Image: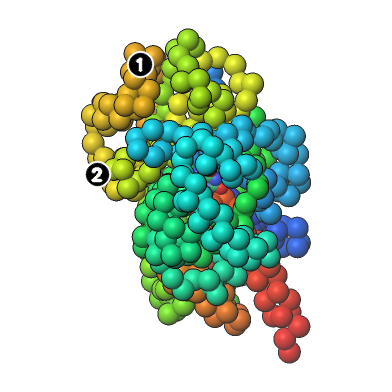
Amino acid sequence: MWKIDERDCMHPVNAVVVGAGIAGLCCAWELKRAGLRVTVLERSESVGGRIRSERFYGHDIEVGAQFPSSGYRYILPLMRDTGTIARLVKSSPWGAVERNHTLHAVHARRPWTMLTGGLLGIGEYGKLALGSLAPLWQGRRLNPSEYATLAALDDADAAQWCATTMGAAARDYVFEPMIHGFYFQRLSGTSRALVAALLAFNGADALAVTGGWQALPIAMAAQLDVRSGATVDAIEEMPEGVRVRVGDEWLVADRVILACPANVSRELLPCASEAEQAVLAVKYASSIHVAFALRSNWKPPAYLRGIHGALAAPCEGADIAALTFESGRLPGSDGGEVLSVMLGNDAARRAMNRPDDELLRDIVEQLDRTFPDLHAAIVETRVRRWPTAEPRSPVGRARAVAAYRRSLVGRRRVVLAGDYLGSPWTDGAAETGRWAAHHIVRSASADRSAP
Ligand SMILES: Cc1cc2nc3c(=O)[nH]c(=O)nc-3n(C[C@H](O)[C@H](O)[C@H](O)COP(=O)(O)OP(=O)(O)OC[C@H]3O[C@@H](n4cnc5c(N)ncnc54)[C@H](O)[C@@H]3O)c2cc1C
């Protein structure tokens, strides 16, 4: 356990960031660049939070965040700054989506493959193509990872909006599989702002990081003052600064950035303002990631060879939200195949406390329906549970985030960051950290120039 040096308490740091996920690290990175003295306190022994890579069966698999996107605006510059960009490779552009309990291959940049691959009928595809013209045109001007800027589109339920604008088939077999597969939540109950953000990534490539995506947070942490194994239990705001408690020790900072999930920040900030309470009230979708190492002679059916992953259609009752094939995620990787399975929120909640063997039996039973010989090819398994996998995005969240940002014009010493304050993916989380840092730098210089 890290002990706070008494000298630190006598010479207060400028800023303390709580949480070394990508939001906290990005915030600390920007603060350091602006010349502030910053310390990051991280509960776990490793950095990265939900960006987590593990060695499994000769592969570096992702058990948390799976794919960076070529459309990311904050993660890619950080990879450039840390020299990790050279590890980026393009995943296979082919994926698959389920309909009638069958997977249909789809190419990320050739939308007509939804028609030629049998996912949509001609009338259904026509309705999607026509209906998506206006949202796609609008999306060209959006920054999908800055969720606050999507507040103007945060006015309708996504399921209804998709059905009305692009048809029921597009709702059930295009948008719902994406929202469920990427964010583990159902389309109904989600804001159309999130679908608009997704559409703004149109044409972007799914990427992978050789050696594991966690290389990015590790490289960032190496250039920052990060203290791992340091759980922040309490913070106390005082006129002259903020006291931060880690076990029996206290640290004093001018500014504190809470970059941990909302349930933790809620506990640490009992006297939250109305705008803070509104963003902290967010609920999370859960997921469970299961990795299956498969014998090297196992191959998926020919029409699915080389795909990077597949999305299930929740309207067909699947527990599985998404699959990732290591051979398509990181083309050229040697050794046997690793198949990763991620459960959707409802299934993950039901299974959160079930023993691994029961959970694995059920998942293999479901996989066998699509890949009949799969059970016999499994040589190793690994299960990772994520109770707070992704923040939900009901109608109103983008507006609450925008209101929170507007509310911080004063000299508030505690600032919130994390994916629940932005778009629910790594690039959105990084944007919130960057925003928090810029807010602090601006308010610190206002402090200095105040009479
Ligand atoms: C299974 C899965 C798949 C995903 N797939 C993708 C994907 O393909 N692409 C993508 O871009 N995103 C994906 N995501 C989402 C992405 O991982 C998250 O949006 C992002 O990593 C969140 O970053 P964060 O910094 O906001 O939070 P976190 O990564 O959760 O970081 C918060 C940190 O705070 C620390 N902490 C908590 N409490 C305390 C405390 N009291 N004191 C000190 N430290 C504390 C935690 O240990 C953690 O390190 C996926 C997520 C999951 C779970």
Report whether 209 appears left or right of 48.
right
Report whether 33 appears left or right of 349.
right
From this view, report whether residue 98 is shown above or below residue 146: above
Q: Mark 2 — residue?
A: 350
Residue 204 at x, y percent in the picture = 65, 46
The amino acid at mark 2 is: Arg
Disc 2 Cβ-to-ligand 1 distance below 8 Å: no
Report helix, strand or loop for mark 2: helix
Front position in the image: 30 or 393: 393
From this view, report whether residue 119 is shown above or below residue 396: above
Tell me, for residue 373, which label it has, or none.
1
Report helix, strand or loop for mark 1: loop
Q: Residue at x 46, y 44 (%)?
A: 120
Distance from the alpha carbon under mark 2 to that under mark 1: 27 Å
Q: Residue at x 41, y 24 (%)?
A: 292
Q: Quadrant of the C terminus?
A: bottom right
Kindly indicate the quadrant of the structure image that contains residue 439.
bottom right
Residue 391 at x, y percent in the picture = 43, 57
Which mark is nearer the camera, 2 or 1?
1
Front position in the image: 264 or 168: 168
Residue 218 at x, y percent in the picture = 62, 40
Report whether 212 appears left or right of 176.
right
Q: Is residue 21 visible?
A: no
Front position in the image: 219 or 391: 391
Report whether 135 appears left or right of 101.
right
Disc 1 Cβ-to-ligand 1 distance below 8 Å: no
From this view, report whether residue 134 is shown above or below residue 224: below
